Amino acid sequence: MKLNKLAACIAASTLLVACGSDSNDNSYSNPDVQKVLNTNADIALAAYQDSVITAKALQTELAKFKANPIADNLTAAKKAWLVAREPYGQTEVYRFRNSPIDSTDYQSEDGPEGDINAWPLGEALIDYVATNNSDFGDDQVGVTANSAGINGNGALTAANASTDNSNNIIGEASITIDADLLARTATADDEHDVIAGYHAIEFLLWGQDLRSDNQQPTVGTDRDQAVNATAMGGQRPLTDFTTNVADPDSPAARRHQYLEVAAAKLVADLEQVRDGWKEGATYRTAFTRINSDAEANQRLTEILTGMGTLSEGELAGERMQIAYAGNSQEDEHSCFSDNTHRDVVLNALGVANSYYGNYAGYDSDLDGTVDVTTNAVDGFGIDELLAARQQTTLATQLDNAFTATATAYNKIDASARNGVPFDVLIMEANRSNTNPVAETILALNAQSVKIQQVATQLGLGDVVDDDASGCDTTNPGSDAGC
């Protein structure tokens, strides 16, 4: 295959001398790569800006609910949470590359992601939980340690939680609920002590996803009975927000306080990430300003690492296969709201956004169609970079891979919209080669292989982090190594 000079620069595995340098300022000049980087940054800014907008809308609805805790306002707050997930889910592809979500200095992993979207949640640290010996035992609701002041910052078992329903932040009135408290999140070695972010708000709004007939914990064999309630997701009663709410030390008042603090922290954390992608910001400037072929390669590697690692390790492995292979409701990403189908769709869509250089916007009425396009981006993607390099065969293969993934995840989405959510699809009785969860895991694995081929063709090395998950995503039903 014939490569032009620019393609040859990118494809070389070791590049020390800049191609196409401007002799006047010795700056690097690579129009196609520069356009990819600018578009990638534009999409990040747009998606995080939409995440801030929708998080603020959630904050507003929670304030209305606190002022007037009636059923309609609880429903509105839940809808606002679901809408807030629509743009944010598309940003997960910006992880795994020390961008502002994971890092404040482009080097260390000290970013706010753990405060925003960490999971699984330490729900027993936050509020009362129902327990059993299967889906709601120590592995699901227990924590090995915490920094929230529960049990002397020690372990909290399912037995502890069931013995004393007040042995949690909501129940212990002496614990002040503020931003400092919620910043003490994911501090244990297993990071199961998460108490901040989207999922903390989700748990407080929905509660656990219990059987709809008797409000007992679901187990692996009766989970289908949990979708017979008025709506999918948890069954937290409105009385949790109204009983003795005038008493500031009551559990109801403290739940409202927790939601208020968690929402304010979420907005602030998202604003911090968004601001790192603004024009002139230190991170964006460092990411988009390339002065050598080596820097160009590094930036492309970062983009593809986010795409490849999210596809295979984080989404296919951690967020899907662990739950699917283990029939574990508590291991699905949004188990309280039964919104995991959207997590899958949106995370995968974010990968496609980076490849095609497009961001359509988000769905504000939850009908599955994007209707808020204010910050939409239509830019220059990696697909166009491949076309410019005459890599038509590889580009076609990537198109086919993204189409296969979309076909599979749309089946998960359709299933949930038809009353069979992700936690029912993963039940052992429902597992088969044609199960859309299994199909999506396999499609994401195949997609990651093609993403790696792009990196290999461009001489960029490995872009799929093997440490992101121990799951063998070529075998969705196996939990070996997960």
Image (cartoon, helix red, strand yellow):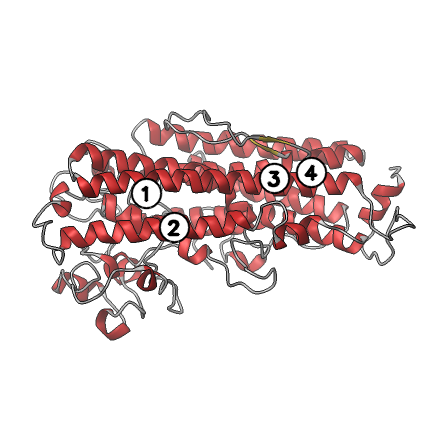
Pick whichever of labels 1 and 4 is earlier in the sequence: 1
Say above or below: 7 vs 193.
above
Q: How many marks?
A: 4
Q: Given the image, on which type of amino acid does mark 2 rest?
A: Leu
Distance from Cα at disc 1 to Cα at disc 3: 26 Å
Point out the tag, 3 or 2, that comes first from the N-terminus: 3
Where is residue 14 drawn, in percent x and y? Answer: 82, 57
Residue 210: give x, y in percent of width and height. 20, 44
- Tell whether 229 sits left or right of 278: left
Residue closer to the observer: 136 or 4: 4
Q: Which residue is mark 4?
A: 382
Q: Is residue 439 left or right of residue 220?
A: right
* Amino acid type for the residue under numbered disc 1: Gln
Left or right relative to 101: residue 179? left
Q: Which residue is mark 2?
A: 266
Q: Position of residue 113 (x, y in %)?
A: 46, 55
